[in-house]
Image: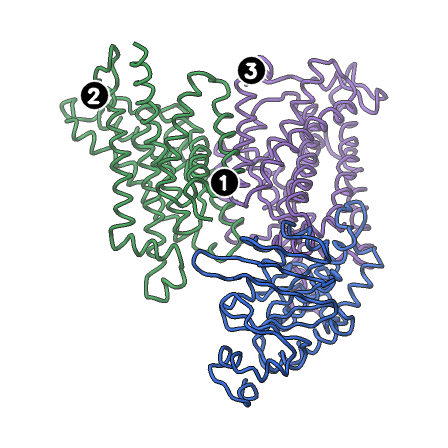
């Protein structure tokens, strides 16, 4: 019996499938590009959050979906990216967003390389707990060293003081916020598209295949000559960088950087996004992040027991819909197509 | 004079170790029998603390003549543990059992979801302000050690920890149920083929593990007050304990709890800012040198 | 210079002497069968040589170099590959991807994260060729999990073969397969291996297969080499017949299976 459809995590992108993929991607990008002209500032702002969380979820899923490593501590890299930017802006007076991105990525690189080195030496359960523990260490540091990090008051970064594209676009004067959101949306959109393209190439590269081999059978991976631990570490660092980039982009939008983004529930949200969208598909995390973002925006308003809702949905997903939104749709369309032909 | 201080600190460490042992032993037991890591374990400990605090608080408030006998109050302490055991007995067959055939990511995800649910249930039931069962502590008075007074309650907790350790050991190695438990943990299919009801063993083992967590919360709670977020901290500490001691080992949980507790007590004295980091460093070091822990099986 | 030489190789598991002072030599181009009753130490020996297990003492010399302390990946790079008795595949990848991965790894391309795997024509063609050699061309796009047992055993061997090793260890490649398919599978494997002159050591229980294909048979018993020699010598060796079949006599082996 052959079940060639959804069991493979990534559908083979060859020939007509690739063209279809590119066409769909272009259509979506065009739709996204047109959006700020048709909706108001709040909706645009909301979608920016969705896009940058999608970048974080995409990075997270390189570890879970492709390498088989479940991290409960990705808030650490998001938070490192964010706090590095906050420090750069507050203490060094940097205004260029590009410099912030560079600095933030360097900070995230250091932390994820260090944490990754410690974590990837271990089996899945210990890996998960270690990632959680290390992120808690960072959180407790941000909390305790409040004279550096601002503690629970956080660090303020005013979007009005930042510049995009090396100073070409600034946000002084009246109507600054709306102009900022408008310009920042396209800025983030471009970075989101670039990040997605980069991740797509990575998972379809020989390295990406090697990661999947490690996920499926780490013993055999070693026996065909793949350096398992080293590749896991590299995947970890890449994953952390994506989360860090998301954190960097989050700072100007949110305005205030607090230890909450280092705290474990935030890691849980990233996990949830990937599982909701479907962690065995490339686009799953993107869909999951965007859907989750809207869910949160509209549900938080109506309930202070947001975590309860999240937990219940996660439990239901795991028991009933483990392939998530995208995975389930893929399975249904395959079955439908199978019946039709 | 300083010997008194050191003695007090040692007793504090033993107190903390007793609580940690209870939590870690429960975690280790569940893993040893079922190969399940319950990420909500620390949160169950927290729930135990809250339930006990609430029960004790209500008891003291509603006692007819204002004073319940000390024995009566002490009998209330395990109530929290029993409630948690019941919760566990509900969770295992309904939520965890469907996942045994699936890769382990699934049960990690599910128990993480449970963690989030229970954390908010605590908030829902008991509100956001810390609850205290300190009245038990007060009613037990204190005994003089050197020139200082030390809460008798803490010694009571250390005693409970010892009793639990011995009791658990006797239960696992000296009773018929313990044999069944060990058989099932070693080879589930074989045990089933021999006619053992694996499902019943699992739910019982899980309930016992949860009972331990709840008991840890019940006895530890009065000394520290139940606060939101204590669950995850407890989970991580319990993990540090089983990393050092070895996952699935009872002796490991005991030794690990002692080590972690001593380090933590010393750390708070001398390096209060980074005591958490010191513990993680030790755990990371142990993981690197001896990944299965001091007493663990591979 | 022999291709492989083990010197006083030992591996114990407590009291059990899985590999007990084994001195085995494999010459280039040989097709050697490693036989023996269950528990003789055949798989343990294979595990030690392929670095799945560390020896307690002794040396392993491969192509003149001491590889005793080399890791799994180092040994693979040196040219030792193995297949597994209990099939060890990348279950969620297609048969094609499984083989292609071995080739990517061999060519050192797995560190490449900036190129698309399916665009590498050289690797793709070779992967298809290998699949064809093992009769799996039709199942190219089927995930490994969805293959039949016999196909999975073939794929397991194909993975090791795709590494183009100097020495190929095959651990019971036909075990767990129905009798009808055994012969076909072994024929396929043998034609590929012998056709390219790859040095191979095969752990086997099926003596018909062993006698048909081997240049040399090595009989192990209780961790040590009991006897070795060409098929005719082993066939008439009474001690071997005793160990393997429990009875001696010139017709002992022809009654087998």
The residue sitting at 74% across, 76% down in the picture is C191
> Which comes sooner in the sequence, label 1 or label 2?
2
Q: Which residue is mark 1?
A: B290
Read off the chain for label 3: A
Q: Which one is in front, B223 or B134?
A: B223
Q: Are marks 1 and 3 on the same chain?
A: no
User: In the rendered view, does C26 fall on the left or right side of B57?
Assistant: right
- The colour of chain B is green
Q: Which residue is mark 3?
A: A146
On-image quarter of the C terminus of chain A: bottom right
Q: Are marks 2 and 3 on the same chain?
A: no
- The colour of chain C is blue
User: In the rendered view, does B99 fall on the left or right side of A52?
Assistant: left
- Is residue C103 positioned above or below C152 on the image? above
Read off the chain for label 2: B
Quadrant of the rendered image containing residue C97: bottom right
Percent from the top left, x then y, of residue A13?
Answer: 77, 56
- Is residue A115 positioned above or below B2 on the image? below
As helix, strand or loop, the secondary structure at mark 1 comes to: loop
- Is residue A173 positioned above or below B178 on the image? above
Give me the chain that's purple: A
Q: CA distance from mark 1 to mark 3?
A: 36 Å
The residue sitting at 63% across, 60% down in the picture is C6
Of the numbered discs in the image, which one, if any, rests on residue B139?
A: 2
Farthest residue to the bottom: give it.
Answer: C251
Percent from the top left, x then y, of residue B277?
Answer: 51, 25
Q: Which one is in front, B130 or B71?
A: B71
- Is residue B282 positioned above or below A143 on the image? below
- Within-10-Å neighbours for mark 3: few <14, some 14–19, many 20+: some
């Amino acid at each position: 019996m052959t079940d060639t459809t959804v069991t493979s995590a990534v559908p083979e992108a060859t020939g007509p499938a690739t063209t279809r993929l590119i066409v769909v991607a272009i259509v979506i990008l065009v739709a996204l590009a047109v959006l700020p002209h048709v909706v108001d500032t709040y909706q645009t702002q909301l979608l920016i959050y969705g896009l940058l969380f999608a970048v974080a979820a995409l990075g997270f899923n390189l570890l879970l979906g492709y390498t088989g490593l479940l991290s409960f501590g990705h808030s650490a890299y998001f938070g490192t990216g964010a706090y590095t930017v906050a420090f750069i802006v507050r203490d060094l007076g940097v205004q260029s967003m590009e410099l912030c991105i560079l600095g933030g990525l360097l900070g995230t690189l250091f932390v994820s390389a260090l944490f990754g080195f410690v974590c990837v030496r271990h089996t899945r359960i210990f890996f998960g707990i270690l990632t959680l523990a290390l992120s808690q260490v960072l959180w407790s540091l941000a909390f305790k060293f409040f004279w550096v990090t601002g503690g629970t008051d956080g660090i303020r970064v005013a979007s009005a003081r930042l510049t995009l594209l090396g100073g070409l676009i600034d946000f002084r004067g009246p109507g600054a916020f709306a102009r900022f959101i408008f310009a920042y949306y396209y800025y983030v959109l471009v970075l989101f598209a670039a990040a997605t393209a980069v991740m797509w190439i990575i998972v379809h590269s020989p390295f990406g295949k090697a990661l999947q081999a490690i996920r499926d059978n780490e013993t055999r991976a070693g026996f065909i000559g793949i350096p398992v631990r080293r590749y896991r570490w590299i995947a970890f660092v890449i994953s952390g960088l994506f989360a860090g980039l998301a954190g960097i982009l989050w700072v100007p939008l949110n305005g205030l950087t607090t230890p909450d983004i280092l705290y474990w529930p935030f890691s849980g949200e990233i996990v949830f996004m990937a599982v909701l969208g479907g962690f065995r598909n490339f686009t799953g995390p993107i869909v999951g992040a965007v859907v989750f973002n809207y869910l949160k925006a509209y549900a938080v308003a109506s309930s202070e027991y947001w975590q309860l809702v999240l937990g219940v949905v996660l439990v239901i997903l795991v028991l009933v819909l483990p392939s998530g939104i995208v995975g389930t749709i893929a399975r249904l369309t395959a079955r439908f197509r199978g019946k039709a032909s | 004079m300083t010997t008194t201080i050191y003695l007090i600190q040692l007793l504090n460490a033993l107190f903390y170790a007793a609580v940690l042992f209870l939590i870690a032993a429960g975690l280790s037991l569940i893993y040893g029998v079922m190969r399940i890591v319950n990420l909500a374990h620390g949160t169950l400990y927290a729930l135990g603390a809250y339930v006990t605090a609430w029960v004790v608080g209500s008891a003291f408030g509603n006692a007819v003549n204002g004073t319940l006998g000390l024995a009566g109050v002490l009998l209330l302490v395990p109530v929290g543990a029993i409630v948690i055991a019941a919760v566990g007995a509900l969770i295992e067959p309904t939520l965890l059992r469907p996942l045994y055939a699936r890769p382990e990511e699934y049960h990690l995800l599910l128990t993480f979801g449970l963690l989030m649910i229970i954390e908010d249930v605590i908030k829902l039931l008991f509100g956001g302000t810390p609850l205290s069962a300190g009245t038990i502590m007060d009613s037990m008075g204190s005994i003089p050690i050197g020139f200082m007074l030390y809460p008798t309650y803490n010694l009571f907790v250390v005693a409970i920890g010892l009793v639990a350790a011995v009791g658990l050991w006797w239960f696992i190695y000296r009773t018929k149920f313990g044999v069944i438990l060990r058989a099932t943990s070693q080879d589930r299919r074989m045990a089933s083929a021999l006619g053992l009801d694996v499902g019943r063993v699992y739910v019982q083992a899980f309930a016992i593990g949860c009972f331990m967590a709840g008991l840890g919360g019940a006895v530890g709670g009065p000394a520290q007050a139940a606060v939101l977020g204590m669950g995850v901290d407890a989970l991580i500490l319990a993990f540090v304990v089983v990393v050092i001691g070895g996952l699935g080992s009872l002796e490991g949980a005991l030794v690990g709890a002692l080590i972690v507790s001593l380090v933590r007590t010393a750390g708070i004295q001398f390096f209060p800012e980074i005591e958490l980091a010191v513990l993680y460093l030790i755990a990371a070091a142990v993981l690197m040198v001896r990944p299965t822990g001091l007493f663990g099986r591979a | 210079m022999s291709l492989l030489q083990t010197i006083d190789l030992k591996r114990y598991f407590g009291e059990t002497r899985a590999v007990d002072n084994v001195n085995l030599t494999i010459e280039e181009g040989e097709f050697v069968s490693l036989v023996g009753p269950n528990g003789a130490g055949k798989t343990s020996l294979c595990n030690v040589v392929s670095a799945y297990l560390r020896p307690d003492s002794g040396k392993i010399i491969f192509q003149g170099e001491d590889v005793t302390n080399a890791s799994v990946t180092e040994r693979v790079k040196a040219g030792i590959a193995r297949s597994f008795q209990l099939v060890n595949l990348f279950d969620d990848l297609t048969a094609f991807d499984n083989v292609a991965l071995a080739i990517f790894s061999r060519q050192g391309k797995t560190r490449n994260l900036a190129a698309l795997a399916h665009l590498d024509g050289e690797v793709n063609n070779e992967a298809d060729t290998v699949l064809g050699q093992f009769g799996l061309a039709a199942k190219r796009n089927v995930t490994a999990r969805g293959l039949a047992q016999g196909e999975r055993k073939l794929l397991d061997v194909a993975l090791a073969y795709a590494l183009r090793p100097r020495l190929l260890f095959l651990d019971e490649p036909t075990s767990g397969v129905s009798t009808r398919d055994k012969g076909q599978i072994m024929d396929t494997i043998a034609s590929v291996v012998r056709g390219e002159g790859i040095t191979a050591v095969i752990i086997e229980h099926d003596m018909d297969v062993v006698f048909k294909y081997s240049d040399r048979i090595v009989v192990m018993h209780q961790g040590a080499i009991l006897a070795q020699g060409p098929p005719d010598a082993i066939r008439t060796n009474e001690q071997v017949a005793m160990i393997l079949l429990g009875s001696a006599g010139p017709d002992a082996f022809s009654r087998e299976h």
